[in-house]
Image (tube, rainbow, N blue to C red):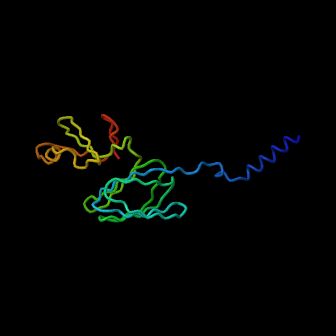
Amino acid sequence: MKKVSLLVVLGLLFSLLPLNVFAAEPAELDLRVYNRTEGPVSVRLTAADGTLQYLELPVGVSELTLTEGIYEYYIITSCGTQVGQWNVNVVKELLIKCSVDTLELSLQRACPNNRWGHYYYLPEYYTRWFISFDEPNGPDWFEWLYNDPDILVVNGGIGCWDGFRNWNEY
């Protein structure tokens, strides 16, 4: 009888504890940032708990480590300002670029092997090219090919190239 009473008392005590006592701590996640603007980017992040973070991101590739969670962001660039919300729940990549004086942001799940860039193809010849963000201008011959009015080169968009014929557009 004493054992049953002890189990009941322990059960009642555990039922009084909040559920988050048993939850895992939020993970620290890496965020790879591709700043494709022509200047530094100012970022203000506000975490769900109200913690503020101010960042200055240089042109090129940089990495941030954020605690898993929801963030309000305020971004200032030479081509505009944007406000919104991010859910940082897995390792992600952020692309910041200016397109005809308009700020474009894309926050997506990280690309395997970090092979992130532009995809082009020639429909007439069934030929494809992937040009990595790490080499933004591509090979020397590409500009000539892309600007030739007699050859149709289609821009397939920005995405992740994770192997031969495996293209995931973002």
Taking 73 as reference, is 31 above or below it? above
- Nearer to the camera, 132 or 169: 132
Taking 145 as reference, is 51 above or below it? below
Query: Is 163 displayed left or right of 124 in the figure?
Result: right
Taking 58 as reference, is 141 above or below it? above
- Nearer to the camera, 17 or 54: 54
Query: Is 77 displayed left or right of 141 in the figure?
Result: right
Counting from the top left corner in percent of width and height, residue 164 is at 30, 34
* Quadrant holding the N terminus: top right
- Nearer to the camera, 106 or 59: 59
Q: Residue at x 45, y 56 (%)?
A: 86
Residue with the most extreme left position: 150
Query: Is 64 displayed left or right of 100 in the figure?
Result: right
Taking 101 as reference, is 162 above or below it? above
Occupied quadrant, residue 102: bottom left
- Count of numbered labels shown in the rendering: 0
Q: Residue at x 78, y 47 (%)?
A: 10
Counting from the top left corner in percent of width and height, residue 152 is at 16, 43
Occupied quadrant, residue 129: top left
Counting from the top left corner in percent of width and height, residue 20 is at 64, 52
